[in-house]
Image: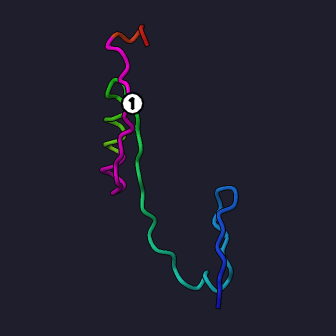
Amino acid sequence: MLFLTALIGGFLVFNEAQAQTPPAPAKILVVYFSRTGNTAEVAKQIHASVDSDLFRIEMEEPYPGDYEAT
C-alpha cells in the first residue's frame, strides 16, 4: 500500500495509517554566519543544548578587516 507524505507550507501532511507509527526523532542542524564571533558563540550554545549538527557558513571572499569598509 502506498502512503503519500507532503510538506505543505511548513506543515507535514500524512494519512491516518502513518499516524499510528511514531515518527523518527528529527535531526537538528544549526547553521550560522558570524562576522565578529558573537553569533558563533550563540550557535555553539544552541548546538550543545539541543544535540545537533553545527555548520558554519563561510564567505568565498572574506569581508575586509575594517568593519566600516564592509
Residue type at mark 1: give it: Met
Asked which quadrant contains residue 17, the reply is: bottom right
Query: Which of the two residues, 12 or 50, is positioned nearer the viewer here?
Result: 12
**Which residue does the numbered mark 1 point to in the structure image?**
59
Rendered-image quadrant of the N terminus: bottom right
Residue at figure coordinates x 35%, y 14% from the top left: 64
Residue 19: give x, y in percent of width and height: 61, 81
Q: Please give the count of numbered marks on the rendered protein.
A: 1
Colour scheme in use = rainbow
- Above or below: residue 13 compared with residue 11: below
Residue at the bottom extreme of this rendering: 1
Residue at the front extreme of this rendering: 60
Residue at figure coordinates x 66%, y 68% from the top left: 6
Residue 20: give x, y in percent of width and height: 58, 85
Residues shaded magenta: 46-65
Taking the image as shown, residue 6 lies to the left or right of residue 54, namely right
- Above or below: residue 23 compared with residue 28: below
Residue at figure coordinates x 35%, y 23% from the top left: 62
Rendered-image quadrant of the C terminus: top left
Element assignment for label 1:
loop
- Above or below: residue 64 compared with residue 46: above
- Above or below: residue 54 compared with residue 40: below
Residue 8, magenta (yes or no): no
Residue at figure coordinates x 33%, y 57% from the top left: 51
Taking the image as shown, residue 51 lies to the left or right of residue 7, namely left
Residue 62, magenta (yes or no): yes
Q: Residues within 10 Å of mark 1 (few under 14, many from 20)?
A: few
Residue 59: give x, y in percent of width and height: 39, 30
Residue 35: give x, y in percent of width and height: 37, 25
